[in-house]
């Protein structure tokens, strides 16, 4: 792969130039960048590295998080990053089958627009899939939504349950 490093750096620089020269937001590029950076934020948080497998981050040294969760060396983390709210909701997509390939789900909320206000929740996979409320696609839990304001407006609603789950496992 060393021979590809020059092209990698070239493409990174060209991408940077295009984005910084733009005066409009390309929403798809924004989502790509958020997802890419969300994985590295979580890798730093758990002393891990980003991988391209059925999950996103592999813990190397482990970590004890401020929410009480202990990440062990070898733990696998699926990262879902939200950068745009839809009707006041944050959403994590493409969750089908993840429960078989990860130990934790990390939710990264970048919807605030201020990089200093990124919110993160790291939830054990079994808790996430047992307690979370999902929108199913073809009988498979695919989407997880929570309130972008973090206010619980309707007790017992799916979004309120999911918002409480996010808050319970939020890393401060």
Image (spheres, rainbow, N blue to C red):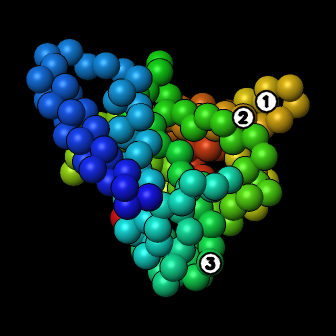
What residue sits right under mark 3 in the picture? Answer: 74
Specify the quadrant that holds the C terminus.
bottom left
Query: In front: 165, or 115?
Result: 115
Query: In front: 14, or 127?
Result: 14
**Left or right, 52 with reference to 24:** right
Residue lying at 37% horizontally and 55% vertically, measured from the top left: 3
Q: Position of residue 158 (x, y in %)?
A: 68, 35
**Left or right, 59 with reference to 14:** right
What residue sits right under mark 1 in the picture? Answer: 136
Mark 1–mark 3 Cα distance, whole angstroms, equals 30 Å
Query: In front: 37, or 111?
Result: 37
Residue lying at 41% horizontally and 34% vertically, measured from the top left: 32
Are discs 2 and 1 less than 8 Å apart at CB? yes
Please indicate, yes or no, whether residue 84 appears anywhere in the rendered image: yes
What residue sits right under mark 2 in the picture? Answer: 142
Residue lying at 56% horizontally and 68% vertically, measured from the top left: 58
Compare marks 3 and 2 and give the one earlier in the sequence.
3
**Left or right, 2 with reference to 15:** right
Are discs 3 and 2 less than 8 Å apart at CB? no
Q: Position of residue 94 (x, y in %)?
A: 66, 36
- Which quadrant of the structure image shows residue 18? top left
Q: Given the current orientation, which residue lies at the most extreme right position?
A: 139
Q: Position of residue 169 (x, y in %)?
A: 53, 62
Q: Residues within 10 Å of mark 1 (few under 14, many from 20)?
A: few
**SS of the residue at dot 2?**
strand
Residue 34 position (above or below residue 78): above
Q: Residues within 10 Å of mark 3 (few under 14, many from 20)?
A: some
Query: In front: 133, or 19?
Result: 19
Please indicate, yes or no, whether residue 122 appears anywhere in the rendered image: no
**Left or right, 66 with reference to 101:** left
């Amino acid at each position: 792969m060393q021979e590809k490093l020059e092209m990698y750096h070239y493409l990174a620089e060209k991408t940077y130039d295009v984005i910084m020269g733009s005066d409009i937001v390309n929403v798809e590029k924004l989502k790509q960048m958020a997802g890419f950076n969300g994985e590295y934020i979580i890798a730093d948080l758990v002393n891990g590295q980003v991988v391209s497998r059925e999950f996103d981050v592999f813990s190397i040294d482990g970590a004890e998080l401020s929410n009480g969760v202990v990440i062990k060396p070898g733990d696998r983390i699926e990262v879902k990053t939200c950068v745009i709210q839809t009707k006041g909701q944050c959403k994590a997509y493409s969750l089908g089958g993840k429960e078989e390939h990860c130990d934790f789900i990390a939710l990264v909320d970048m919807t605030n627009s201020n990089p200093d206000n990124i919110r993160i929740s790291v939830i054990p996979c079994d808790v996430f899939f047992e307690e979370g409320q999902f929108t199913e696609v073809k009988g498979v839990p695919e989407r997880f939504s929570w309130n972008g304001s973090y206010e619980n407006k309707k007790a017992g609603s799916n979004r309120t349950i999911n918002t409480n789950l996010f808050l319970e496992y939020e890393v401060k």
